[in-house]
Amino acid sequence: MSIDELGRHARHPFFGVREDCLTVDGRSLLEIAVQAGRTPFYVYVRRYMTDRVKELRSLLPDDVRLHYAVKANPMPAVVNHMAQLVDGLDVASSREMQVALDTGMVAANISIAGPGKTNDELAQAAAAGITINIESEREIRVLGEIGRRSGRPPRVAVRVNPEFELKTSGMKMGGGPKQFGIDSERVPDILQEIRRLPLEFRGFHIFSGSQNLRVDALIEAQCRSAELAARLAQHAPAPVRMINLGGGFGIPYFPGDQPLDITPIGANLRSLIPEIRSHMPDAELILELGRYLVGESGLYVCRVIDRKISRGHTFLVTDGGLHQHLAASGNFGQVVRKNYPVLIGNHVREAQRETASVVGPLCTPLDVLADRMELSVAHEGDLVVVLQSGAYGLTASPIEFLGHPAPVELVV
């Protein structure tokens, strides 16, 4: 990767080059590697996250509440930092719920989603006072019984599986048969069931897709979600207090990707709010974002341990790999594998370049971090950097595969 390409992917002034070495928020990558103690490691930049949230708020209506989707990066230090910047946290397990509660975020501003919440998780969430996005009739029954036993109605919202999907999204979470949420046509009956039970109804969660770089697709999905919420509100057992439109905001990873333009999305939300208020005057509009808030703040760094030539092709064998960064290997949802932005961190501008593949130490041909990519010539001991690694990195990877040590994580 060239320095021009680095600039395209690192749009904020927190990554640069000094003496041919990558800098991270003004500090040399070599210095950060010493701080980490060993490779591989992930490093996340606090100021990048802060800047992203500030920029986003400047482009969105003041009435829109921002929530951080903890699953994108559940490292406690990251979640603690994000909790100071956003209006709420959204979790997907009891472990993430505890991390969120430990930040001091008000429980009413935390929600939990997921299609397989256990009875224990439901009881924990109800006891903590967070909002539970119900996704099945079973969950309603269990929560109703919890409410009867405790005398304290659990806070609930209905996660809706809409009849539409977020077009061109990386992962489609709505439309057609899905394990997520309750089919929209069944929601009116579900709302009547909630009316009969000791449950505190809060509103709707409508999330139809992720990792989208198409402004028109996001605007269409938000408009249709708002319309759907207004129709369903006619059957609600109590005033709608919240509408979670999910997120779906993507970040650029691959050649040809362009950064998402938030300005028209903000303008569309601004135009939607009066209509939403006319149907649901008490409703807060929530955007739940994960990757968009933290994805570009992080790097994954591993070290070249061997350089070998096989039938004329160069392989840089590193101490990192798919077991620590599954997404960069192309095995986390890619249909056709594409290279993440990768560079040699301590030789960014090196004039001597070559086409090489960066691979890990695992006994599988799937363990590839960069396939036939133009890079600076690298040797044993050099540092390979994978950009765009702040989201769905370590915890989205099979870290126990073949028993290699887990990487270090640090925040600077």
Image (tube, helix red, strand yellow):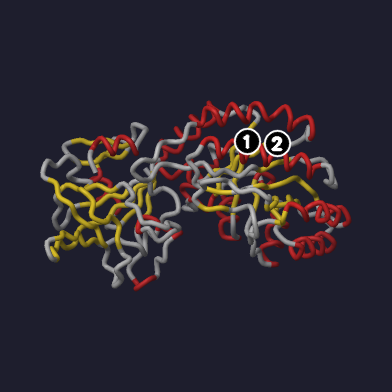
In the rendered image, the vertical position of residue 98 relative to residue 275, given as above or below: below
Marks 2 & 1, CB-CB < 8 Å contact: yes
Q: How crowded is the residue under tag 2: few (<14 C-alpha within 10 Å), some, or many (20+)?
A: some
Q: Residues within 10 Å of mark 1 (few under 14, many from 20)?
A: some
Residue 215 position in % (x across, y down): 52, 35
Where is mark 2, residue-wise? 284
Which quadrant is home to the N terminus? top left
Q: Dot 2: what SS?
A: strand
Q: Where in the figure is residue 202, as x and y percent of width and height?
A: 76, 45
Q: Is residue 178 or residue 119 the one in the foreground?
A: 178
Q: Which residue is mark 1?
A: 65
The part of the image, by quadrant, that contains residue 361 is: bottom left
Amino acid marked by disc 2:
Glu
Q: Residue 328, percent across and down?
A: 36, 55
In the picture, measured across the screen, residue 243 lies left or right of residue 374, that is: right
At 36% from the left and 40% from the top, the residue drawn is 256
Residue 147's image quarter? bottom right
